[in-house]
Image (cartoon, helix red, strand yellow):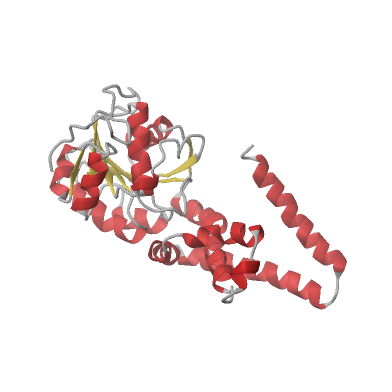
Amino acid sequence: MDNATGTSGNAFPRANGSRSENVGIETLGIDGVGLIGGSIAAAVKSRGLCRLVLGFGRSAGRLEIAREEGLIDDCSTDYRAAAKVDLLVCCLPVDRIGDAVRSAAKYMRPGTTVTDAGSVKVAVCAEIGSEPAPGIAFVGSHPLAGSEKQGFEHADAGLFAGRTCIVTPTEMSNASAVSRIAEFWRGLGSNVVTMPPAEHDRIMARTSHVPHAIAAAIAAGLANGEEHFAASGFRDMTRIAGGDPRLWTGILLANREAVSAEMNAFIERCEAISSALASSDAQEVERLLVDGQRRRKAFAETFQ
């Protein structure tokens, strides 16, 4: 596919030719131009962090639409084009990241850095390793931003601004590659935190993966006709259940050990409430609800 030339009616800004000297990217590759990949492209362009954004994917038609709208500058369904990139961000479902990175790395120039945006790190980092091909460095990362919406049509250049991005180096990670990936996310406005992959997965099980499974279970329990009586509480509790089931199946399975452990802990908390109700222990019911309220307030204050 040809380089984009652009028109004045493009929905997304094109790179202005300037770039962050700290990031130092000429050509950025994005594998998977959906909500996250599209938002990375939009943010990079709005901030002038590179000269060219090259999108990869399986659907030539979808990539061409993204190119025509100015979200990416060029596109390819062939990983041989990865020879052009300085940095590749893999924004695919977690069960496809490993194969994709290894396939693309075979064609990359030595010195190229690769990262991902997946929400599971132990499995991904173990599958890829710190060097998926000679001279190619991989460092895992996970921006804590997103939406239940899907597709680059919902791309948001400000999606990562002020949000946390976790970078997960291993003992074998290249130090300069870790620094480069951290600077890349800072260039998008993110607050970067580094931690080992296992710690990341344990935290995500509690704060993201189990909540999604619970939201799906609550939504599935709604009987036909009862939607007319479900108000804002049900809506807020089940919003994330609208996410892609195939994507989330991969996430839950990839992090199944941490998710199972946290799910069991959640069941114990539910059983504590159930036991207090069965014994009409109002004091214990209130204590458990107050504990939840206190932790919810602490969470809300971090985003004020």
Q: Height in image: 148 above or below 55?
A: below
Q: Residue 11: which quarter of the image?
A: top left
What is the tally of numbered marks visible in this picture?
Answer: 0
> What residue is rendered at 50% in x and 40% in y?
164
- Is the N terminus in the top left, top right, bottom left or bottom right quadrant? top left
Nearer the observer, 255 or 178 = 255
Q: Is residue 159 visible?
A: yes
Q: Residue 162: x and y, percent? A: 51, 35
> What residue is rendered at 56% in x and 68% in y?
219
Query: In the shown orientation, is residue 231 left or right of residue 115?
Result: right
Query: In the shown orientation, is residue 201 left or right of residue 292?
Result: left
Query: In the shown orientation, is residue 3 left or right of residue 162?
Result: left
Q: Is residue 172 visible?
A: no
Nearer the observer, 169 or 284 = 284
Q: Residue 150: x and y, percent? A: 39, 53
Q: Height in image: 254 above or below 19?
A: below
Nearer the observer, 61 or 141 = 61
> What residue is rendered at 20% in x and 49% in y?
104
Q: Residue 301: x and y, percent? A: 67, 40
Q: Residue 258: x and y, percent? A: 51, 63
- Is the C terminus in the top left, top right, bottom left or bottom right quadrant? top right
